[in-house]
Image: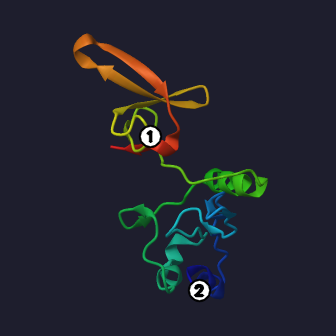
Amino acid sequence: MVVTGLEGRGYKPYLPLYLPHARRNNVLTKSEFPLFPGYVFCRFDVKKRLPVLTTSGVVSVIGCGRKPVPIPDDEIEAVRAVLRSGLPAEICPYLVEGQRVRVTNGSLEGVEGILVKKKTQFRMVVSVTMLQRSLSVEIDSDRLAAL
């Protein structure tokens, strides 16, 4: 496992795990799963990254081209805070306001529009171009996929 390998080399990796609130055969699951499958966070000196890259299971380091780029501390701390809170947390698609999206399930399945936010709710705007008119509908982000 990558975490064990990095710890063995003196690093302090962070693998955020979450407990999905899902039922299978009317039984609440109690297994933890990686919040971001395939990713482990680890702080290291970019000039001395060879020990990280040669750790069993490490494929690459996130970055721009060949240059590693750190994930901002406040984003990692926000993830830690959410998981520490004990509040129900779940994976959802990464969506950006203004992005074109498609509904993946439910009564609006297949409908495309543009994602907007109104207060704390996601809305999808559907437009009729020739009329230059639009309407928006509130929608859960887990029903959306980016185009």
Rendered residue at 53%/60% (across/down): 70
Quadrant in which the N terminus is drawn: bottom right
**Quick one: SS at disc 2?**
helix
The front one of 15 and 115 is: 115
Quadrant in which the C terminus is drawn: top left
Mark 2 Cα-neighbour bin, 10 Å: few <14, some 14–19, many ≥20: some
Q: Which residue is mark 1?
A: 106
Rendered residue at 46%/34% (across/down): 97
* Name of the residue lying farthest toward the left: 130
**Left or right position of 86 against 59:** right
The front one of 97 and 130 is: 130
Q: Amino acid at mark 1?
A: Gly
Judging from the image, the colouring scheme is: rainbow
Disc assigned to residue 8: none
Q: Position of residue 40 (x, y in %)?
A: 56, 70
Q: Which residue is mark 2?
A: 5
Q: Amino acid at mark 2?
A: Gly
Rendered residue at 64%/73% (across/down): 13
Residue 78 sits above or below residue 23 on the image:
above
**Quick one: SS at disc 1?**
loop
Q: Report if the CB atoms under discs 2 and 1 are less than 8 Å apart.
A: no
The front one of 16 and 21 is: 21
**Left or right position of 42 against 86:** left
Q: Position of residue 116 (x, y in %)?
A: 47, 29
Separation (CA) of disc 2 from disc 1: 43 Å
Q: Earlier in the sequence, mark 2 or mark 1?
A: 2
Mark 1 Cα-neighbour bin, 10 Å: few <14, some 14–19, many ≥20: few
Marks 2, 1: nearer the viewer = 1
* Name of the residue lying farthest toward the front: 25
Q: Position of residue 144 (x, y in %)?
A: 44, 42
Name the quadrant containing residue 63: bottom left
